[in-house]
């Protein structure tokens, strides 16, 4: 436990490059709130066609949606959906800031910042409204986006979501908050677990020891992934293609992946509740039977929304599926997502003029087509 402190000052990484040098032929970059974001898009969308925004979870990236982006954009013919996926700092090929302005909106690694970047990206692309698909912690970012700007969302798809199972309306006082927190997917901690949390908090607050810890653990995880051990599939023996392995590992070649991860861990905070009672947009949950506490939590939130009766809610659970339905059940996942998008687009309401949505964006999106230095990836 003392080793991260004993290891001293971590040496500079020598095997990383600027994220742009790792980009694919279809990668694009745009600066939002001073941070360079990497994104991909497919489809142009026609009149009355929806836009879908895909948001990955912890340690994910645009690569998480490789089997979804293009096929989803083609539904309904040549003028189907416009589908966008972006890398939320500190993941993928987006910039990992090492300093930022003081204040509640300064830290680029919080869930609130992720929502701010999502909103800024949509504004940069002239998109007034989108169906938001959030995987794992991306669902949390989707709810933060809802809190920030509910009108920008026309529908939710929560995929294996990491969400609190308590509605804000139920949290009326501190005593009630303490009681409801027992129903959240976060387990009740024993004394030993609480001490471990305190130790981890102190460790991560140390610049040198925290960085040593992050590097050691993520490099260990990198070595496991390199052997095809993703540890997120229900079927542990499921074959993982080399291109998929390389796609998941590529972000660890980007400058400052280690410090960005450290700052993200420091900033992470799981809320006790969310304003589910305010949702009026259609909602779909897609979960895996084998995803444990996250699936149980998702079912509770779905039941809560159904009980509220303020929005249409659908819950889908795939048998023998783990935490990544879009990888483990790609055909079923795409079918259900397409069906939901079709249903939502048929009920779309008029939206604001996109011309008014470019304020606060530092520059227009620019396509980047460098020679890729990484192996080709599927999709």
Image (cartoon, rainbow, N blue to C red):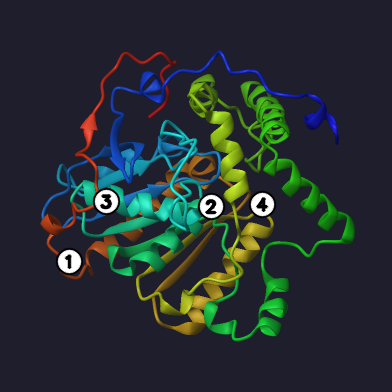
**Residue 275 to residue 218: above or below:** below
Q: Residues within 10 Å of mark 4 (few under 14, many from 20)?
A: some
- Residue occupying image coordinates x 54% and y 57%: 161
Q: Which residue is mark 3?
A: 122
Question: From the viewer's perspective, is the residue at label 1 or at label 3 nearer?
Answer: 3
Q: To which quarter of the image does residue 156 belong?
A: bottom left
Percent position of residue 9, x then y: 70, 24
Q: Earlier in the sequence, mark 3 or mark 4?
A: 3
Secondary element under disc 4, as helix, strand or loop, is loop
Determine the CA span between mark 1 and mark 2: 28 Å
Percent position of residue 295, x then y: 62, 59
Determine the CA span between mark 2 and mark 3: 19 Å
Q: Which residue is mark 1?
A: 351
Asked if residue 67 lies left or right of residue 130, the reply is right
Of residue 39 and residue 331, the one placed in the foreground of this image is: 39
Q: Earlier in the sequence, mark 4 or mark 1?
A: 4
Figure disc tally = 4
Determine the CA span between mark 4 and mark 1: 39 Å
Q: Which residue is mark 4?
A: 290
Determine the CA span between mark 2 and mark 4: 18 Å
Asked if residue 242 lies left or right of residue 226, the reply is left
Q: Which residue is mark 2?
A: 137
Percent position of residue 260, x then y: 54, 36
Q: Residues within 10 Å of mark 1 (few under 14, many from 20)?
A: few
**Mark 3 and mark 4 residues within 8 Å of each other at the beta carbon:** no
Q: In what quadrant of the picture does the C terminus appear? A: top left
Determine the CA span between mark 3 and mark 4: 34 Å
Q: Earlier in the sequence, mark 1 or mark 2?
A: 2
Mark drawn on residue 175: none
């Amino acid at each position: 436990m003392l080793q991260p402190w004993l290891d001293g000052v971590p040496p500079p990484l020598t095997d990383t490059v600027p994220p742009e040098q790792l980009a694919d032929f279809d990668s694009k970059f745009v600066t939002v709130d001073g941070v360079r974001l990497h994104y991909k898009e497919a489809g142009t969308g026609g009149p009355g066609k929806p836009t879908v925004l895909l948001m990955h979870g912890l340690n994910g990236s645009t690569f998480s949606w490789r089997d979804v982006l293009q096929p989803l954009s083609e539904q309904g013919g040549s003028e189907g959906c416009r589908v966008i996926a972006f890398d939320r700092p500190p993941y993928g090929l987006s910039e990992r800031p090492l300093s930022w302005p003081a204040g509640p909106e300064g830290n680029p690694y919080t869930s609130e910042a992720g929502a701010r970047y999502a909103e800024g990206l949509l504004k940069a692309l002239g998109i007034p409204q989108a169906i938001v698909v959030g995987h794992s912690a991306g669902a949390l970012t989707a709810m933060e986006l809802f809190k920030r700007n509910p009108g920008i969302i026309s529908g939710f798809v929560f995929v294996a979501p990491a969400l609190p199972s308590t509605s804000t309306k139920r949290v009326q006082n501190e005593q009630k908050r303490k009681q409801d927190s027992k129903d959240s997917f976060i387990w009740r901690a024993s004394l030993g677990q609480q001490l471990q949390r305190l130790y981890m908090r102190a460790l991560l607050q140390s610049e040198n020891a925290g960085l040593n810890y992050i590097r050691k653990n993520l490099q260990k995880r990198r070595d496991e992934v390199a052997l095809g051990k993703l540890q997120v599939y229900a079927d542990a023996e499921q074959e993982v293609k080399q291109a998929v392995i390389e796609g998941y590992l590529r972000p660890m070649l980007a400058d400052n992946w280690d410090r960005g991860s450290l700052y993200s861990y420091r900033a992470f905070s799981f809320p006790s509740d969310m304003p589910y009672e305010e949702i009026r947009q259609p909602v779909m949950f897609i979960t895996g039977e084998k995803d444990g506490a996250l699936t149980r939590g998702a079912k509770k939130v779905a039941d809560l929304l159904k009980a509220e009766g303020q929005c249409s809610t659908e819950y889908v659970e795939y048998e023998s599926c783990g935490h990544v339905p879009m990888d483990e059940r790609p055909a079923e996942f795409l079918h259900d997502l397409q069906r939901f998008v079709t249903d939502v687009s048929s009920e779309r309401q008029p939206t604001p003029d996109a011309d008014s949505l470019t304020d606060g964006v530092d520059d227009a999106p620019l396509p980047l087509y460098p020679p890729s230095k990484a192996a080709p990836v599927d999709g």
